[in-house]
Image (cartoon, rainbow, N blue to C red):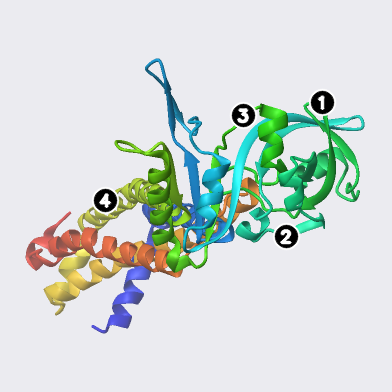
Amino acid sequence: MSFLMVLRVAFKALLRNKMRTALTMLGMIIGVSAVITMVALGTGAQSSIETQIQAAGTNMIMVSAGNFQAGGVRQGQGNASTLTADDAQAIREVPGVQYIAAGVNTRGQVVAGNMNWGTQIQGTDVDLPLIRSWPEKIGGFFMPIDVATASKVAVLGSVVHEQLFGADVNPVGQVIRINNQPFTVVGVMSSKGQSGMGQDQDDVVYVPYTTVMKKMRGITFIQNVTVSASSAADTTPTADRIATLLRTRHKVQDSDDFMVRTMEEMASVRVQATETMTALLASIAGVSLLVGGIGIMNIMLVSVTERTREIGLRMAIGARGRDVLLQFLVEAVVLSLVGGTIGIGLGLGFSQGVTAWMAWPTKVSPQSIAVAFFFAAITGVFFGFYPARKAAALDPIDALRFE
């Protein structure tokens, strides 16, 4: 009996009970579509994180103030007052450092005319656009003289610009008030979107860090230093040299009062977390494949019982046991593959739907489709083998007598 004939008979047998066949395939359809969708969600999130990290610059190094402890109470990382502007200037001389920008942050209410907007006020230095590869949309960034004199000048993020002035208005030269202090707008940054940590990089106002220190917060320390290494390959050695320098300057003996992190380290943590979540979701979805496979086995066992006389008749006129085994095995595999194909189509549709409705990035890779199709076939073979073997082991005489 040719394989083509076996396939033809398999389709006829399955179409004989259309409703039962459809319900049997439903478990496989749900399982495969769930696997495709979950993997697409995880892969899309991972790809988005990697893109954001690359946009920020893989050679970027973040130096942050460490933990502050008062009266036995730990205030958390970033609260120490040991990181200073002099440290930032010393870091500039470290071999491998290309650009640096000291940073001090606060929040404030920004007012322009009769419009106001609460946002983050980020004190930084003139090198920030170079470190972040971030061009200005309108005007320019503030100058070194503005940092040296703690001038009240501001560069707006695109969200703040739209909220205060409107997207089509040029605000350069306009005076805004930040916490009731007048600042002159000198530029607007182009849209950057969310950072790898989920923060909106456009909802911010940039001012000289010296202005935040002296005229807004009244402090003598900085919170962070953003550093750009001369090359991506030199990022880790440069970070190590910066850590050594700060330990010497701060006379650290036990634990560091600062943190030095590279974007690669932060990216690897986020990607590993996403991969773990993707594996978890895919495993949960894989349970549906298992349920679908059990459903196929149950239906094939029922089919063997219903077609016992048919099996006996075939074997009586010359069909061999392996022919019967192949017949039922092909029927189980057809159920799995057809259900898997429909499930792949639904998974692709669900992925696109999630992107369209929730703006969640998804990415369906050819590998995930191939794996889902492969597991659908394997499920059919695995769960179809026992019913097929049971059918092939029937005695022809007993089968013909079966009522």
Q: Earlier in the sequence, mark 2 or mark 1?
A: 2
Q: Secondary structure at mark 2?
A: loop
Q: Residues within 10 Å of mark 2 (few under 14, many from 20)?
A: some
Q: Which residue in the protein does label 2 denote?
A: 135
Mark 1–mark 3 CB contact (< 8 Å): no
Residue at 31% x, 62% y: name it. 375
Disc on the earlier residue, 3 or 2: 2
Is label 1 in a helix, a strand or a loop?
Answer: loop
As drawn, 144 above or below 1: above
x, y percent for residue 167: 85, 48
Q: Amino acid at mark 4?
A: Ile
The quadrant of the rendering that contains the C terminus is: bottom left
Real-space Cα distance between discs 2 and 1? 29 Å
Q: Is residue 38 visible?
A: yes
Q: Residues within 10 Å of mark 3 (few under 14, many from 20)?
A: few
For discs 1 and 4, the disc positioned in front in the rendered view: 1
Per the image, the residue denoted by label 3 is 219
Q: Residues within 10 Å of mark 4 (few under 14, many from 20)?
A: many
**In the rendering, which numbered label is found on residue 294?**
4
Give the camera-side residue of 320 and 238. 238
First in sequence: mark 1 vs mark 4: 1
Amino acid found under the numbered disc labelled 2: Pro
Farthest-out residue, bottom: 2
The CA span between labels 1 and 3 is 19 Å
Q: Which residue is mark 1?
A: 180
Give the mark toward the camera: 4 or 3: 3
